[in-house]
Amino acid sequence: MAQVEMVCTPRRLPQEQWVEAARVAASINPLNHAPVQRLMMVIPGFQPQALHLAVLTTKYWGGGANNLRSDFWIIPRQISGPASCCI
């Protein structure tokens, strides 16, 4: 039987959702606001666009309790070993 290689892959939003996600992140936690002041100091005439701000915005939710949703895949019985522990 061929060995099955399993990889855990971080998920990310599609690029068209980055700007709205940045707005939500900054509204939930003002410390998520993009630090464009530093860029404006080193790049004369820098005019940030919405996508620039979205990339620079952090997505820290804070130290309180958060409700996160997870989806799990059904793992076939033949998969075992180190890869099966992280699925």
Image (cartoon, rainbow, N blue to C red):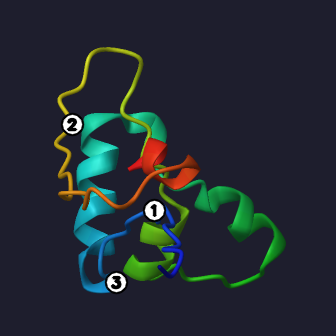
Q: Nearer the viewer, residue 7 or 42?
A: 7
Count of labels shown? 3
Q: Amino acid at mark 2?
A: Leu
| Identity of the residue drawn at 37% across and 68% down | 12
Residue 20, image x and y in percent?
A: 22, 67
Q: Which mark is residue 15?
A: 3
Label located before the other in sequence (2 or 1): 1
Q: Secondary structure at mark 2?
A: loop
Q: Amino acid at mark 3?
A: Gln
| Badge 1 density bin: few <14, some 14–19, many ≥20, Cα 10 Å | few
Above or below, 84 relative to 45: above
> Farthest front residue?
1
Residue 60, image x and y in percent?
A: 44, 38
Q: Which residue is mark 1?
A: 10
Q: Which mark is residue 27?
A: none
| Identity of the residue drawn at 77% across and 81% down | 44
Q: Which residue is mark 2?
A: 68
Name the front one of labels 1 and 3.
1
Q: Amino acid at mark 1?
A: Pro
CA distance separating discs 1 and 3: 15 Å
Label located before the other in sequence (1 or 3): 1
